Amino acid sequence: NAGVTQTPKFQVLKTGQSMTLQCAQDMNHNSMYWYRQDPGMGLRLIYYSASEGTTDKGEVPNGYNVSRLNKREFSLRLESAAPSQTSVYFCASSPTSTGVNTEAFFGQGTRLTVV
Amino acid sequence: QKEVEQNSGPLSVPEGAIASLNCTYSDRGSQSFFWYRQYSGKSPELIMFIYSNGDKEDGRFTAQLNKASQYVSLLIRDSQPSDSATYLCALWGTNAGKSTFGDGTTLTVKP
């Protein structure tokens, strides 16, 4: 049982390049999330998907797009990377998105550097 | 005002002592509350969740929730050096999926 799997673990991009971060969960969870974490800070929500077929903006969505490909997979795309997007990105999933059973489990993270 | 505020650290306690971590929040409609532990360079790990007012105990950890005061805390009894980490307070609010994390409190347990 792998839980939440993110790929890649590390990535270096040049300014203006694009890339997609992949996330998959095998816990049959309905809700999935993308966060970024900057040094010394907590996690900030980029986008989330409360259930398959829905996505919503979080606190810091600018410069990102997401796709909930199916119940298992939720990808994050940077269309034109900027140095301000240098961060650690975490994907998470939870059974539900509201009320009880919202406990979220995290992937191992992707360290992205934009030069 | 931040939506989730944690007591500023770093916090240092001797081994065997009780560590107290505090968190206040602004969304009165928040329904679920979590404490995550994050070791340096690692992903957050869920250690406690609480949904109802009162105390919830799990081993050496106790979470306390007071919705009227908009306050949630984590007590770690018999602190061990392995408890040294950053602790993140998180909540899920009134909008489905909208989660908010505090900036974290770094705890050091000294042998």
Image: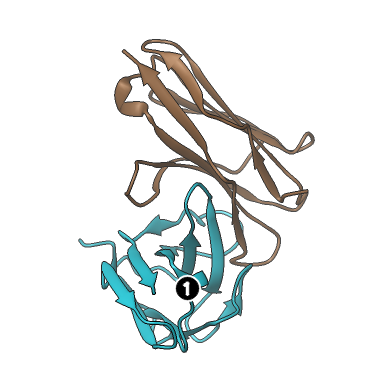
B45 sits left or right of A54 in the view: left
- Secondary structure at badge 1 equals helix
Q: Amino acid at mark 1?
A: Pro
Residue drawn at 50 percent across, 46 percent down: A40
Name, please, the residue furthest toward the left: A1
> Is the residue marked by circle 1 packed among few (<14), some (14-19), or many (20+) residues within 10 Å?
some
Q: Nearer the viewer, residue A84 or A73?
A: A84
Residue drawn at 34 percent across, 79 percent down: A13
Instruction: Name the residue carrying label 1.
Output: A83
Name the chain under label 1: A
Q: Is residue B81 above or below residue B87?
A: above
- Chain A: what color? cyan
Residue A23 percent coordinates (x, y): 34, 74
Residue A8 percent coordinates (x, y): 26, 73
Q: Is residue A84 above or below residue B42?
A: below
Q: Is residue A83 above or below residue B62?
A: below
A74 sits left or right of A56 in the view: left
Residue A5 percent coordinates (x, y): 27, 67
Q: Residue A7 occupies which quadrant of the picture?
A: bottom left
Residue A89 percent coordinates (x, y): 41, 65
- Chain B: what color? brown
